[in-house]
Image: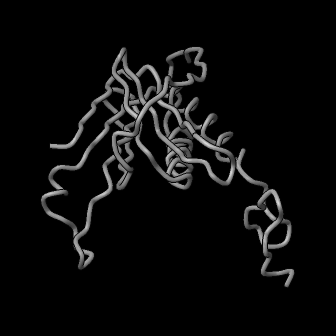
Amino acid sequence: MGVFFQFDDVDAFTTVTQGAPGQRVFFLYARQGNISVAVKCEKQQVAAIADFLRTAMTDLEPSAELPRSLSFETPPPFEAAFVLGPIALGYDRENDRLLVQLEEVIAVDEDGEPDEEAFDDRGQVRVLLQRDQALAFCAHTESVVSAGRAPCAFCGRPMEPNGHPCPTMN
């Protein structure tokens, strides 16, 4: 079986990048005590998770629980446990926690069909977040995503340091 992590009371859950804008590699990082895991992912995946969590938070009844003071944690050097594929997001009403489930991308055979053996052996990370942790994740992720390359004023594509071939400015 692939790696499996279950974080019911996570200490840290955040988006981390390595590299310069335009060359950045994105990771989701979770830590509980001295156990941690990083999952390599795409910028659009972390943005979608933050968007879902932000929307879910606005749809929930207000909580009587006072928010904790959270700060961003820079993780120590790490290697990704796997590359992110399917994402499951939800809400555990009984425990008032938001669920983020990350699954390893499924390998396919030469015909593009899912490899059944790899399907059963894929890695999984399940994280339950308190509301304040979810909000801190959203705020940090949104700032990381927006810190990339500036968009072109004409076509909206990311600008390279030396410009780019803009299809609207032939």
* Number of numbered tags placed on the structure image: 0
11 up-or-down from 92: above or below: above
132 up-or-down from 69: above or below: below
Image quadrant holding the N terminus, namely top left
Asked which colour scheme the image uses, the reply is one colour
Residue 159 image point, x, y percent: 78, 61
Quadrant assignment, res 81: top left
Residue 48 image point, x, y percent: 52, 52
Quadrant assignment, res 108: bottom left
Q: Residue at x 37, y 25 (%)?
A: 36
130 up-or-down from 56: above or below: above
12 horizontally vs 33: left or right: right
Q: Residue furthest front?
A: 162
Towards the viewer: 77 or 126: 77
Image quadrant holding the C terminus, namely bottom right
Towards the viewer: 72 or 96: 72
Q: Residue at x 35, y 55 (%)?
A: 86
Quadrant assignment, res 15: top right
Residue 30 image point, x, y percent: 42, 29
Q: Residue at x 69, y 49 (%)?
A: 21
57 up-or-down from 109: above or below: above
Q: Residue at x 19, y 57 (%)?
A: 119
125 horizontally vs 161: left or right: left
